[in-house]
Image (cartoon, grey):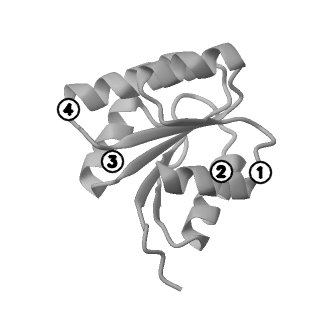
Amino acid sequence: MVNKNRKRILIAKPGLDGHDRGAKVIARALRDAGHEVIYTGLHQTPQMIVGAAIQEDVDLIGLSILSGAHVHLVSATMKELSKNKIKGVKVFVGGIVPDEDVKKLKKMGVAEVFTPGAPLADILAQIEKI
């Protein structure tokens, strides 16, 4: 079955965090749901992520961050998007993010934040709405 809302989605692991199981699970689920997914792998800088997003002409960027550096890494990625005059590309974040930081990330322009334990079906449904 063809997904009428098919999106090109970049999944990235910014920073030094080496745990990518969650990013791979989300990438696979998004592919299975009919989206085109580009997974950049581990240890990406904000510049590398935005460069890949431009090159791949994506609709969404998903950042997976478990290191605790989510505010810094997301801020740097959002600034890089702005610096490159990228408009219309939405960002979502998955990882260990305290409630008070979810508000900070959304204020920066993050469309959605998913924390551990979020049901996969809910994540997919929310991403399709972005």
Q: Is residue 62 above or below residue 29?
A: above
Q: Quadrant of residue 9?
A: bottom left
Residue 40 in view in this figure: no
Is there a contact, CB below 8 Å, between mark 1 and mark 4?
no
Alpha-carbon neighbours of circle 3 within 10 Å: few (<14), some, or many (≥20)?
some
Q: Amino acid at mark 3?
A: Ala
Q: Nearer the viewer, mark 3 or mark 4?
A: 4
Residue 41: x percent and y percent? Answer: 52, 48
Q: Which residue is mark 3?
A: 52
Residue kind at label 4, given as amino acid type? Asn
Q: Nearer the viewer, mark 1 or mark 3?
A: 1
How many marks are shown on the rendered structure?
4
Dots 2, 1 in contact, CB < 8 A = yes
* Badge 1 or badge 4: first in the primary sequence: 4
- Residue drawn at (48%, 36%) of the image: 111
Q: Residue at x 71, y 35 (%)?
A: 115
Q: Which residue is mark 1?
A: 119
Q: Residue furthest left?
A: 85
The amino acid pointed to by label 2 is: Ile
Q: Are marks 2 and 4 in contact (CB under 8 Å)?
A: no
Q: Is residue 23 above or below residue 113?
A: below
- Mark 4 neighbour class, 10 Å CA radius: few under 14, some 14 to 19, many 20 or more: few
Q: Which mark is residue 123?
A: 2
Residue 67 appears left or right of 58:
right
How far is disc 2 from disc 4 in space, using C-alphas?
Answer: 28 Å
Check disc 4 and report the residue beneath it.
84
SS category of the residue bearing label 1: loop
**Mark 1 is on which residue type?**
Pro
Cα–Cα span, label 2 and label 1: 6 Å
Task: Name the spot of residue 38 as percent of width and height, x first.
Answer: 45, 58
- Residue at x 68% of width, y 30% of height: 66
Foreground residue, 43 or 112?
112
